[in-house]
Amino acid sequence: MANQFLVSVADAILRDATTGDAIAYGIANLNSAFTLSTAETQVRGGISNPLLFTYIHDRQLEVQIEQATFDKNILALNAGQSVVSGTVNVTQTDCLVLSSSGSGTITLTPVGDVTVFLPNGTVETVTPATKDITTASGADQRVTAVYITAVSADQITIETTTPPTVVDLTLIAEVRDSTGVIVEKLQINIPRFQVDGNYTLSMTSNGVSTQALNGKALASASADCVSGEYYAKVTWVPVTSVVSYSSIAAIPSTITFAVGSTLQTQQISVLGIRGGTYANANITDDCTFAISGSTLGNLSVGASTGLVSSGSEITASHTGLVTVTYASGSLIDYVNVLAA
C-alpha cells in the first residue's frame, strides 16, 4: 500500500442543489468527518444454525463539519431559510448619565416606550419625545435604557415547520506522501446533502463559539440506465497532470485496412491499467501517437488523437507500426497496421 496520508481537515463548498450557485465556502473548519455505514440481516439455518447469507442494506452516508468561524449561512441552512436583508426591529441598549432634572438622550429613535433600569434596581417605563427621555427618579444617575428600534440588518426567521435545506456539498482535503508533499486532492461530492437541522451555538466567557453542520446524503439519480442511484462521488485529483499507471493497453493491437483506393480510418483507444481495485481508465487524450516502419505508404496517424488513416489509396505493401506513448515515454505500447 502507498505511504500516503490524508492530512488535517477538509474545506467545504456548499452550492444550491438546483441551480449550482455557491452558498458558502468553509475554510476554517475545526474538524470534518465522512461516515459510511450499513445495517445487515443475517440468514442462518441448518444444524448449529450456521450463517448462510448476509444481506447488507440501509446504507447511509453522514457528514459532520465543525467551524471555528461564525457564518450566518450555517444557521440558515439548518433552519431551511434564507438570510433576509431589510429594515427590522431590534433591541437597543444605551448607557446614559441623566441630568439633574432626570433627562437624557438615547442613541437611536425608539419604536414605542423606553424602559429605564435605575441603579437601585427600579425599572421605569417612559414615553420618549423622539430620542429624549425623562425620569425624575434617575436625576444625576447612571442608568441603562432599553428599547426597540428599526435598523437595516440581516435576519433569519426560524419557522416551526420548514425543513432544513438540501444542498450540494463538496469536501476537499489534501493527500500527502511520506515526505510531506501534496500528491492528490481528495474531493467528495454529495449532490443532495440533507442538513439535519440540529444546531447548537455555545457561547463561553473564555472562548469563541463554534458551529456545526451535520447531515445525511440523499440518493441521486444516475445520468444513464446502467448505473444505479448514488450518494456521493469520491475523486482523487492528482496535483500533477499525470496519473501513475503500471501499464497501458492500445486497442486494437492490430489494424487491418482493405486494399483499395478509398480513404479509410480507424481509431486507436488507450487504457491505463493500475491493477488491484482500480478500474481501467480511457487515457487516449493523454497519449501521443507516431507512425514508424519501412513501408509506410500513405498511412498517417493523428499525433494526439490516435486516428489512423490509410490515405487515398492503399496496397498490400502498405504496412506500418503505431507507437503509443504515455507520460513522456514512461509507458509505451504498439499497434500493427496491415493491408489485406
Image (spheres, helix red, strand yellow):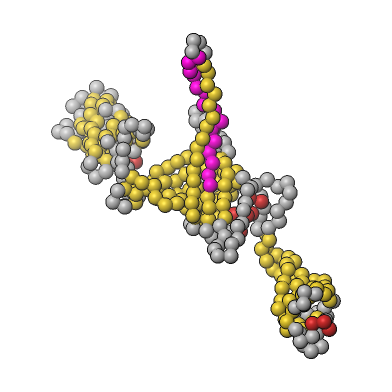
The residue located at (47%, 44%) in the rendering is 188
Of 46 and 93, nearer the camera is 46
Q: Residue at x 23, y 32 (%)?
A: 334
Image coordinates for residue 267, horizontal then vertical, percent = 33, 33
Whole-percent x and y of residue 53? 49, 19
- Residue at (17, 34) in percent of width and height: 293
Q: Quadrant of residue 322?
A: top left
In percent of width and height, residue 184 lies at: 36, 47
Q: Nearer the viewer, residue 160 or 154?
A: 160
- Toward the left, the furthest residue is 294
Q: Quadrant of the C terminus?
A: top left
Read off the magenta span. Answer: 49-64
| Horizontal side of residue 92 vs 43, given as left or right | right
Viewport quadrant of the N terminus:
top left
Type of secondary structure dominating the magenta stretch: strand
Q: Is residue 51 magenta?
A: yes
Q: Is residue 117 magenta?
A: no
Q: Position of residue 333 (x, y in %)?
A: 24, 34
Identify whether 204 is placed above or below 188.
Answer: below
Rendered view: 11 above or below 123: above
Q: Toward the viewer: 316 or 131?
A: 131
Q: Along the line of sight, which residue is nearer the eye, 136 or 242?
A: 136
Q: Is residue 270 visible?
A: no
- Left or right placement of residue 139 versus residue 194 in this view: right
